[in-house]
Image (spheres, rainbow, N blue to C red):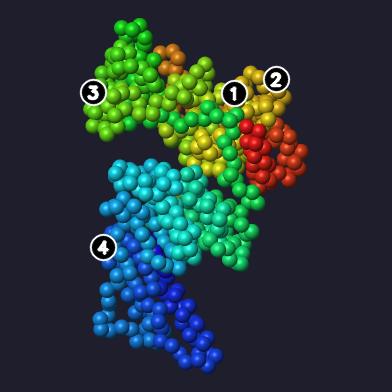
Amino acid sequence: MLDPACGSGNFLYLSLLALKDLEHRANLEAEALGCSREFPAVGPECVLGIELNPYAAELARVSVWIGEIQWMRRNGFEASRNPILRSLGNIECRDAVLDVETGRRAAWPEANVVVGNPPFLGGSKKRSELGLEYTETLKAAWPHVPGGVDLVCYWFAGAWDRMVACKLERAGLVSTNSIRGGANREVIKPIVAHGRIFEAWGDEAWTVDGAAVRVSLICFERERGDETPSLNGLPVDKINSDLTDFPFDLTSALRLSENKSTCFEGGQKHGPFEVDDDTARAWLQAPRNPNGRPNSDVLRRFVNATDIVRRMSDAWVVDFGAVMSEHEAAFFEQPFEHIHEHVKPVRMKSSLAAHRDYWWRHHRTRPELRKALGGKSRYLVTPVVAKHRVFTWLTMNYWPTNLVDAIARDDDTTFGILHSRFHELWALGMGTSLEDRPRYTPSTTFETFPFPEGLTPATPAADYAEDPRAQAISTAAARLNELRENWLNPPDLIERVPEVVPGYPDRILPKDEAAAQVLKKRTLTNLYNQRPAWLDHAHRALDEAVADAYGWGDDFRAGTLTDDEILARLFHLNQERAARQ
């Protein structure tokens, strides 16, 4: 038994006890049949480990010996006395996935079974935590593993590769629950396609270094055994790569061309481009610049995910767009001087040439999003990660961060379809999660979703304005938005104050301190946590309109349209449309 990320040896300790219990049971049964009782042969040498941290590796060796001594004494056998603890070379202190000297994959010792709790390190953090050189070398050493995956995925890939080479029988590993989706899931797909997951828990609470996380526990093999698979403690026919037991594999849903160039990640700054509200408003009221343009051309309200699910902050950001040259940016005197003083010194220290060459621009300027928003007065946004999948409207004066996804549509019909139970279920099924909060992405959750026929993002809203289906959805969606806005910002608690210059939305301010205390709790998260009856009724009316648009209205009203049935039908539509592309 091998644990290739053994830490201080907890899994090795438990594995040794389990192996010794199995042997002891076999010996007792043999003795009952008349055979002589044998002295235990299973010992610490039967558990193998790899651990990068020298101190943890030594703790693991001690833990295993303690387990051996405890078991022997508990079961009436004499434990080793001279010496009490012997050296355990089968627990190695080294990297388990990369041989840094050769730049190749690290070798694993021969074993029948692999278990372990590999390190939890998100794909986006590998470079900062492990270093650029190590990360690039690791990627080159494992060319069949997607580069942006969480670090734990290399242990799954390593175990599966050994099974394919007939050097391993079974494996059971702990991962963050994000392994169920996105690029991480790619290491699970070959296991399901050519072997099987025989036992799994998809989303369990776990504590790592005092921090609560959500994990998946996955046991898999290449040779398919006879026992019935178990998912979350229940027998199932098959476990899919997203750790569901649907009769169809939702992970094989394909991106639809009709949904492309509509949903985008927000921008990334990489530098202190923000300015406080007083400075921003002073710049807005300043005289026009030498180019005849006001500072409002490059000042935008800045929106992150917290602003959406809680209360909107009064954050501002300087944004010189995607193509503005340094010469052009310099005409906006006050914003440019601020960026020159505060951002340029940071950018000049960056290892990225683009940061140094275009220091006045954001890191990710999202030209494709800017193009898609052209000619629109508003657009939809949703947090990348949130407990509730909510959508809301922003005007063009707002610029979203990379933790916000922006949908370049301005019609209530699209808002209603996205806020329906149909899209919510699809997003939950196709997306990953961070801890217990689902993640939304343009590629996996939006571009794969089959909108009702004729109401897709490829169709201009004006083309279906007279469609009764679109009108019904639009009416229900607008009503939902109106009711939510009334709850979030009751007229008797707020004052709408015009911004210091035209073109920006009014500022929403509490009338007094008592109102401010009430408004602090008026957030979309709290609203959907409570889900009052009026909100539930509004969503049901919206869901009914969307069901009618799909042609499933009678089943919805009859109560036969279960969540699993909805996903099955949407998956069928996805496959059908993908085949026509």
Disc count in the image? 4
**Mark nearer the viewer, 1 or 4:** 4
- Residue labelled with disc 1: 411
- Residue labelled with disc 2: 466
Q: What element does badge 1 sit on?
A: loop
- Residue labelled with disc 3: 341
Q: Is residue 560 visible?
A: yes
Quick check: 10 above or below 304? Answer: below
Q: Nearer the viewer, residue 407 or 209?
A: 407
Residue drawn at the location 50% of the way across and 48% of the way down: 185
Q: CA distance from mark 1 to mark 3?
A: 41 Å
Q: What element does badge 3 sit on?
A: helix
Label 4, residues with CA under 10 Å away: few <14, some 14-19, many ≥20 = few
Quick check: 177 above or below 418? Answer: below
Residue drawn at the location 35% of the way across and 29% of the way down: 363
Q: Nearer the viewer, residue 265 or 353?
A: 353
First in residue order: circle 2 vs circle 3: 3
The picture quadrant where one finds residue 117 is bottom left
- Residue labelled with disc 4: 55
Q: CA distance from mark 2 to mark 1?
A: 13 Å
Amino acid type for the residue under numbered disc 1: Asp
Q: What element does badge 4 sit on?
A: helix
The picture quadrant where one finds residue 14 is bottom left
